[in-house]
Image (spheres, helix red, strand yellow):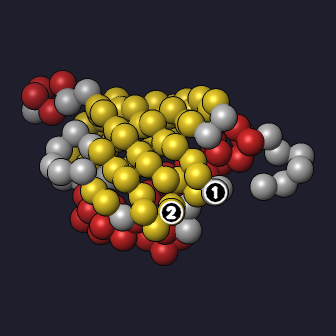
Amino acid sequence: MSREMSREDFNKNLVCGLANALNDHDLMRARSYLTDDLHFIGVFGPTLEGADVYLDAMGRLGAQQTILKCLAEHDDVACFYELSLPAKPEIRLFGCGWFTIDSDRINSIRVVFDPTPLGKT
């Protein structure tokens, strides 16, 4: 972390960097933002334990994220975003993610989204 950048700005940049890497399908770059023991809780399926397990799932999902707003407090970042899936890119799902930072890497992620637009197709 640079001296000019606040802790909160650094943490928001980590989360945005992860989103950009996933959008680019660059899993190696995405891995650099995560701790080895990442803990992920999503809407579907079991909790994912470990960065590599998470990245495997995200790689298969292939979703695109557009971050609308990120808020940071200490080592927590909350992001509001729109998510689109490859099978239906015209559908935009509103979602929220809660990211916890540890040792300058993302250590846990918890996400929720509004599935309402999926029922309209």
Residue indicated by mark 2: 35
Residue appearing at x 36%, y 64% in the figure: 50
Quarter occupied by the N terminus: bottom right
State the SS at label 1. Answer: loop
Left or right of 7 on screen, residue 49: left
Of the numbered discs 1 and 2, the one sitting upstream in the chain is 2
Viewer can see residue 35: yes
| Quarter of the rendering containing residue 71 | top right
The percent position of residue 6, horizontal first and vertical second, equals 79, 40
* Residue 5 lies in quadrant: top right
Left or right for 109, reference 113: right
Q: In the depicted view, which residue is nearer to us: 84 or 53?
A: 53
- Residue 13, percent from left and from top: 65, 48
Q: Amino acid at mark 1?
A: Ser
Image spot of residue 59 (x, y percent): 31, 65
Residue pushed farthest bottom? 28
Q: Residue at x 42, y 58 (%)?
A: 38
- Of the pair 117 and 55, the residue shown nearer to us: 55
Check disc 1: other Cα within 10 Å, few if <14, some if 14-19, many if 20+.
few
Pointers 1 and 2 in contact (C-beta within 8 Å): yes
Q: Identify the image quadrant of the C terminus.
A: top left
Residue 69 higher or lower than 4, as above or below: above
Q: Which mark is residue 103?
A: 1
The residue positioned 46% from the left and 67% from the top of the image is: 36
The disc labelled 2 sits on which kind of residue? Thr
* Residue in front for this viewpoint, 35 or 86: 35
Q: Check the image and report above or below for 28 versus 30.
A: below
Label 2, secondary structure: give it: strand
Q: Is residue 32 above or below residue 1?
A: below
x%, y% of residue 65? 42, 45
